[in-house]
Image: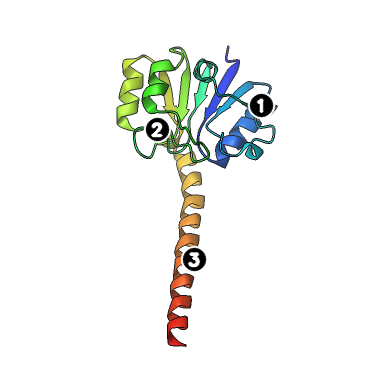
Amino acid sequence: MFDTISVIGGDLRQLTVARLLRAEGFHVFLYGFDRDGSLLNGAADAESDLDYVLGADIVVLPVPVTFDGVTVNSPYSDDPLTIDGLLDNINPSAVVFGGQIRPALAAELDERGIAYRDYLKREELAVRNAVPTAFIKVQWMLADLIAVCIDFCLSLC
């Protein structure tokens, strides 16, 4: 039923998803990791042809799907896929998974009859995603605080 899966953009969590899906025997395309090929490490077949990528049976988008509403969140890509490019070229029978799908994108997917699921609407995943996110933010705040303290101490010398 579902033979091909495209994992598009995102961070290292997306690479983990690609590796797990490949280990389960799925044919996995990976798009949006062109900046550093060493990250792939057998996660999937890196693909630059959007016809293959968007022709997949399942499309896995990142958390969040987009920061700017224009491009798919792809911090490891020099040429991220646009939301319009996604919508215009996606397999109409594909199932799309993503996190924090914006209402405008959800409306476009509905209008085109494309099935989708926002996995952050599942409470258990939202909570599990929030804990490491909060931890990282606390680390950043502590790093900033340490830098301010060091600057202050140096100004006293």
Q: Which quadrant would the N terminus be assigned to in this image? A: top right
Name the spot of residue 16 as percent of width and height, x first: 61, 37
The amino acid type of the residue labelled 2 equals Thr
Q: Quadrant of residue 36?
A: top right
**131 vs 29, nearest the viewer:** 29
In this rendering, position of residue 18 left or right of residue 150? right
**120 vs 73, nearest the viewer:** 73
Name the spot of residue 3 as percent of width and height, x first: 60, 15
Name the spot of residue 144 as percent of width and height, x first: 45, 66
Name the spot of residue 60 as percent of width and height, x first: 51, 28
| CB atoms of marks 1 and 2 within 8 Å | no
- Report helix, strand or loop for mark 3: helix
Measured in 3D between alpha carbons, the distance from the residue under mark 3 to the one under mark 2, in whole angstroms, is 30 Å
Q: Which residue is mark 1?
A: 22
Q: Which mark is residue 135?
A: none
User: Going from the N terminus, do you reach mark 3 or mark 2 first?
Assistant: 2
Tell us which disc is closer to us: 3 or 1: 3
Q: Residue at x 35, y 15 (%)?
A: 112
- Report helix, strand or loop for mark 2: loop
- Report helix, strand or loop for mark 1: helix
Q: Residue at x 45, y 42 (%)?
A: 126
The amino acid type of the residue labelled 1 equals Arg
Measured in 3D between alpha carbons, the distance from the residue under mark 3 to the one under mark 1, in whole angstroms, is 37 Å
Tell us which disc is closer to us: 1 or 2: 2
The amino acid type of the residue labelled 3 equals Ala
Crowd around label 2: few <14 · some 14–19 · many ≥20 (10 Å)? some
Q: Which residue is mark 2?
A: 71
Q: Which residue is mark 3?
A: 143
Q: Quadrant of residue 141?
A: bottom left
